Amino acid sequence: MNYIELNIPVGDGLEAEVLVAELAEFPFESFQEDEALLKAYIPAGRLPDCKERVDALLTARGITGARYIEIETQNWNAVWESHFEPVEVEGKLVIRAPFHSPAGGDVREIIIMPKMSFGTGHHATTWLMSAEMCDHDFAGRRVLDMGSGTGVLAILAAKMGAGSVDAVDIDEWAWRNSQENIALNGVEGIVRPVMGDAGAIRGKNYDVVLANINRNILLADMPAYVAAMNTGGELIVSGILETDIEAIERRATELGLVPTGQRIKEGWAVVSFRIDGR
């Protein structure tokens, strides 16, 4: 499969982060920041269906000089290996690729094969989710990871003692990549990769729901998450900007959730909730 690399000139890191959040609503599968350039990757066959809308988004933001470049799939791993560095999360966790040396010591580590899936820890939202998860109890709990991407958060939940984890993503490439990463981390008996959307969790129940997606999907699908949560269950969400917190908390409160905390990094946010009395 060939991919298209969309090169977008950006003024600063914040502009790049905002564009990542907006472009993630299209079938782009990975993003990379390179100085004053944001690179967004999409399967060549999926670009025609959304190119007009992507171009309209860039025009509305006053962005000129964006270029589409076709790249061959076999070049992807070499590109990633030249840029991918281990990610350290508050001294509690290291996310690394198989070609990096082990972290050593007592630090928990996750191995992620960097391919066309979101969730290597480099993006602020994945880092925020990982950091927040490290402060929660997963022992023996049934966990849902919505929009699981590489499976990094599902794998972390498993390594923190979760009894079972459903890792759900709508994208087939992410689903296949998560299977590889689940095996790399030896958690096949705990994490179950599922290809689908919020409909895939209908009739199921969870103690913890993780959702690192984006504001619009979170607002639309939060009722499905709440319907699947056990009494006393927790919801941890990211993929949102700091300015989105109010809207997310308002929607959560309407659904009977109680805010329990939040973290901010580089303008991005993670917010945690609990459900009581049901």
Image: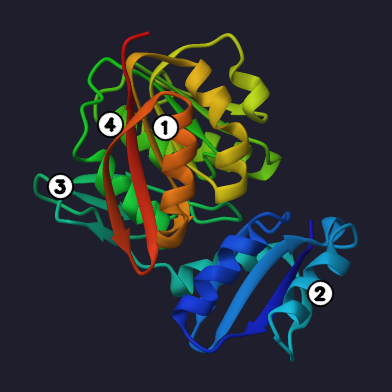
**Could you tell whether 183 is left or right of 31 in the image?**
left
The residue that mark 1 highlights is: 253
Q: What is the crowding at mark 3: few (fewer than 14 residues within 10 Å), some, or many (at least 20)?
A: few
Q: Secondary structure at mark 2?
A: helix
Q: Which mark is residue 159?
A: 4
Q: Nearer the viewer, residue 26 or 246?
A: 246
Which element is circle 3 on?
loop
Distance Cα–Cα, label 4 vs label 2: 41 Å
Q: Residue at x 24, y 59 (%)?
A: 88
Q: Which residue is mark 2?
A: 55
Q: Which circle, 4 or 2, is nearer the viewer? A: 2
Whether residues under marks 4 and 3 lie with C-beta atoms below 8 angstroms apart, the answer is: no
Q: Residues within 10 Å of mark 4 (few under 14, many from 20)?
A: some
Amino acid identity at mark 1: Thr
Mark 2 crowdedness (10 Å alpha carbons): few <14, some 14-19, many ≥20: some
Residue 98 visible (yes or no):
no
Distance Cα–Cα, label 1 vs label 2: 36 Å
Residue 115 image point, x, y percent: 56, 55
Q: Residue furthest left?
A: 105
**Residue 262 placement (x, y as % from top left):** 28, 48
Pair 2/3: label in front: 2
Residue type at the position of mark 2: Asp
Q: Residue at x 31, y 46 (%)?
A: 130
Residues marked 2 and 3 touching at CB (< 8 Å): no
Q: Nearer the viewer, mark 1 or mark 4?
A: 1
